[in-house]
Image (cartoon, helix red, strand yellow):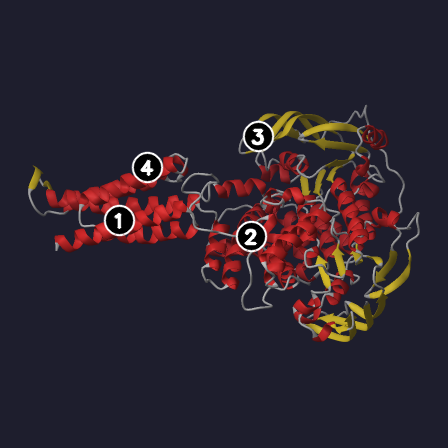
């Protein structure tokens, strides 16, 4: 059994290996950027600042050594952002009238609101993509445990990461076995749907229970849970990159705070 | 070192005892091989020696188990684990992390050892299994043999005094199997520990002259030094040869210039062959050489990128899988992945019902087959209540019930004892004798060579040997594929 092919399919929507500046940042540094960066674009009180955030995040992709196409569903999220912005432009009527054409009217306030909504939406999506594409989930789990997350939760996350490709592969095997035995996926009624769902899920569930037993034997046989804490071989140290990235984040927060205070 | 005294055990919900009044003494440094038919209690014994049976499973136990003087029944698993390590069947199922380094360090980190000691022990454990070069790799990029080496290293890192291997090679191809058994013997010599191997493939271990414990029905049936030749476990039967180079019958399978793969990555390269009625074809090759993909192409589950696959006159690109599946049975590796109904009878006729071919004749045939499989009195039981070997027999019946002309089987002998394997193979031999054809992917040359009329050997997606079995074995020898030669 080899889930090699299925893992590569998963990898397209998840971590993309690399050696760029962003890849080499500490996972928690990137976590701070994701969290505080999201807050910043929502408190920003200038369409220029929100547009600047989108531009900055777009440059993050070449910095990470990949094209924007690496973010799956590019067209979908860009068109959603444009649609959200357009709705604001068309229906918000505040400030100076820019264009009036029959029942349609575009105001300065509408354009500003459109930039806010589309820009914030794009910023959050791009920040999330940059985080996911450049952060190995395993490294993140270990970093969180080193930062104080109880190790039982950390390993629950790691186990989930490990089993996703396995179950994806097994789901394909069960589906193939059903097709080979003449099962037809024609959902004519809710009852038929339930039968099909049960026939598909039951083999996976039985397989999962077997895996849980094997994993429990493996973990307990290696003293998992013997002590309330554990040591870690991995040394994840902050580098000059993290200092620079966190410094830039602090500067941005300071600048935004000053701007907000002076604006009010 | 290990002392088992009058141990009996019954799992909750089971009517039968998995272990019955079993007593066993194992001295320090011994090399013990435990064998016996599926369901005889071998794995349960392993779980008992590690203490898991009494802590992680619900059941009823009598008797005592002592390891190095410690009462295993009353001790936490992590205390027993300081003395006893258990390497399980499937390396993937026992991994707790995603990388080689994390995996080997896992048990040491849990024991709160300092980083310098973890690093030192990790290096030692990886070197004793010959896997130092794997450090830094992610686990899902390793081959089956490499994964099992890492699983062994992860246990060895804790420096146990007893290491138990529960069918450590059942998921491996013959090359990797031979390598892992070599690693086990190397560990025994270098680390001077007690080694217990639960295994069907005892022939591989004969050269190490271990003590052989044969189990049956939860008891020890024989306990002797292993004889150096002949174990009486080969299935009865004569070599069956029906390779017809001039067979006039229309071919069942015609493959021409087949190329296929996953996401642009070629797995099969330029395959051409024909299979005719009466052929029993065994397909061999290292894991990842394209054998399973080849079977998937024959049923139409995977389409050719180039070339043509025709099965019983149907071009797999033009005819839907559902239509081909009426005439082609496919038995997959894991019995649990192909049980869909709520009773043994419904499961046996599941496919025949779906195909609309369940007439009286089919019902009678299915009833006979179930009786022959020893399932005649289990018709109303849920299939998941059957033993592993019984599930495999039920898989066979559910395919034979709709009388396909061609049967494809992917690694169906894994985890089967020789008796059950011979039963399954006898059913297939009858199918072939009745004018059908069989193509079986198998890593068990010592069994399949007694049945197969023709052998295909795959290497990197190409067929490098395609000949009647006897001749093919000679070709494999000439190619240096000794691990595949029975």
Is label 2 on the same chain as label 3?
A: no
Residues at discs 1 and 2 in contact (Cβ within 8 Å):
no
Q: Which residue is mark 1?
A: A252
Q: Position of residue B145 (x, y in %)?
A: 70, 44
The vertical placement of A126 against A39, above or below, is above
Q: Nearer the viewer, mark 3 or mark 1?
A: 1
Q: Quadrant of residue B138?
A: top right
Q: Which residue is mark 3?
A: B317
Q: Secondary structure at mark 4?
A: helix
Q: Chain of mark 2?
A: A
Q: Which residue is mark 4?
A: A59
Is label 2 on the same chain as label 4?
A: yes
Mark earlier in primary sequence (1, 4):
4
The vertical placement of A145 against A226, above or below, is above
Neighbourhood count class around disc 2 (C-alpha, 10 Å): few under 14, some 14–19, many 20 upward: some
Q: Chain of mark 3?
A: B
Q: Nearer the viewer, mark 1 or mark 2?
A: 1
Is label 1 on the same chain as label 4?
A: yes
The vertical placement of B49 against B117, above or below, is below
Q: Quadrant of residue A220?
A: bottom right
Real-space CA distance between mark 3 and mark 1, rounded to the nearest whole angstrom: 59 Å
């Amino acid at each position: 059994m080899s889930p090699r092919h299925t893992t590569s399919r998963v990898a397209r929507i998840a971590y993309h290996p690399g050696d760029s500046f962003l890849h080499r940042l500490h996972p928690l540094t990137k976590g701070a950027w994701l969290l505080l960066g999201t807050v910043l674009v929502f408190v920003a009180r200038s369409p220029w600042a929100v547009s600047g955030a989108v531009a900055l995040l777009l440059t993050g992709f070449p910095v990470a050594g990949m094209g924007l196409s690496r973010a799956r569903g590019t067209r979908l999220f860009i068109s959603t952002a444009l649609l959200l912005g357009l709705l604001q432009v068309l229906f918000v009527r505040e400030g100076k009238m820019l264009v009036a054409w029959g029942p349609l009217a575009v105001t300065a306030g509408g354009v500003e609101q459109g930039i806010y909504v589309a820009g914030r939406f794009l910023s959050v999506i791009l920040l999330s993509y940059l985080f996911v594409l450049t952060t190995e989930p395993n490294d993140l789990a270990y970093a969180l445990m080193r930062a104080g997350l109880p190790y039982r939760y950390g390993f629950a996350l790691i186990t989930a990461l490990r089993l996703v490709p396995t179950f994806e592969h097994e789901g394909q095997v069960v589906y193939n076995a059903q097709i080979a035995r003449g099962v037809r996926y024609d959902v004519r009624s809710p009852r038929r749907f339930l039968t099909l769902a049960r026939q598909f899920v039951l083999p996976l569930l039985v397989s999962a229970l077997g895996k849980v037993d094997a994993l429990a034997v493996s973990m307990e046989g290696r003293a998992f849970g013997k002590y309330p804490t554990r040591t870690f071989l991995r040394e994840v140290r902050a580098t000059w990159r993290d200092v620079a990235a966190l410094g830039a984040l602090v500067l941005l927060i300071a600048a935004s705070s000053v701007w907000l205070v002076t604006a009010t | 070192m290990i002392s088992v005294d009058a141990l009996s055990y019954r799992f909750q919900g089971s009517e039968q005892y998995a272990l019955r009044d079993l007593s066993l003494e194992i001295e320090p440094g011994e090399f013990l091989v435990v064998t016996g038919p599926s369901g005889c209690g071998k794995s349960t014994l392993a779980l008992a020696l590690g203490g898991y049976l009494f802590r992680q499973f619900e059941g009823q136990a009598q008797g005592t188990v002592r390891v190095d003087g410690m009462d295993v029944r009353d001790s936490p698993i992590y205390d027993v684990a300081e003395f006893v390590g258990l390497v399980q069947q499937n390396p993937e199922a026992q991994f707790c992390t995603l990388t080689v380094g994390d995996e080997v360090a896992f048990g040491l980190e849990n024991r709160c050892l300092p980083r310098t000691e973890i690093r030192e022990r990790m290096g030692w454990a990886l070197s004793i299994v010959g896997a130092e070069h794997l450090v830094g790799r992610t686990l899902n990029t390793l081959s089956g043999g490499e994964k099992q080496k890492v699983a062994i290293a992860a246990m060895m890192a804790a420096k146990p005094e007893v290491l138990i291997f529960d069918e450590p090679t059942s998921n491996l191809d013959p090359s990797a199997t031979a390598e892992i058994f070599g690693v086990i013997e190397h560990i025994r010599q270098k680390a001077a520990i007690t080694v217990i191997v639960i295994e069907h493939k005892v022939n591989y271990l004969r050269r190490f002259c271990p003590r052989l414990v044969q189990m049956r029905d939860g008891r020890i049936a024989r306990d002797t030094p292993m004889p150096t030749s002949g174990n009486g476990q080969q299935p009865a039967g004569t070599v069956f040869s029906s390779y017809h180079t001039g067979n006039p019958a229309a071919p069942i399978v015609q493959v021409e210039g087949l190329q296929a793969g996953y996401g642009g990555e070629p797995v099969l390269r330029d395959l051409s062959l024909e299979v005719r009625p009466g052929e029993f074809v065994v397909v061999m090759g290292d894991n990842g050489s394209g054998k399973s993909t080849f079977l998937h192409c024959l049923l139409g589950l995977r389409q050719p990128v180039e070339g043509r696959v025709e099965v019983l006159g149907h071009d797999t690109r033009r005819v839907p899988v559902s239509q081909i599946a009426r005439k082609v049975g496919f038995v997959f590796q894991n019995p649990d992945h192909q049980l869909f109904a709520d009773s043994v009878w419904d499961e046996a006729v599941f496919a025949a019902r779906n195909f609309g071919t369940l007439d009286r004749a089919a019902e009678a045939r299915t009833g006979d087959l179930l009786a022959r499989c020893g399932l005649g009195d289990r018709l109303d039981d849920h299939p998941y209540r059957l033993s592993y070997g019984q599930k495999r027999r039920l898989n066979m019946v559910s395919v034979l019930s709709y009388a396909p002309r061609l049967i494809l089987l992917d690694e169906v002998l894994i985890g089967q004892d020789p008796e059950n394997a011979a039963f399954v193979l006898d059913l297939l031999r009858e199918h072939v004798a009745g004018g059908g054809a069989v193509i079986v992917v198998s890593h068990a040359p010592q069994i399949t060579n007694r049945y197969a009329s023709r052998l295909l050997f795959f290497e990197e997606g190409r067929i490098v040997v395609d000949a009647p079995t006897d001749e093919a074995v000679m070709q494999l020898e000439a190619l240096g594929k000794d691990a595949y030669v029975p």
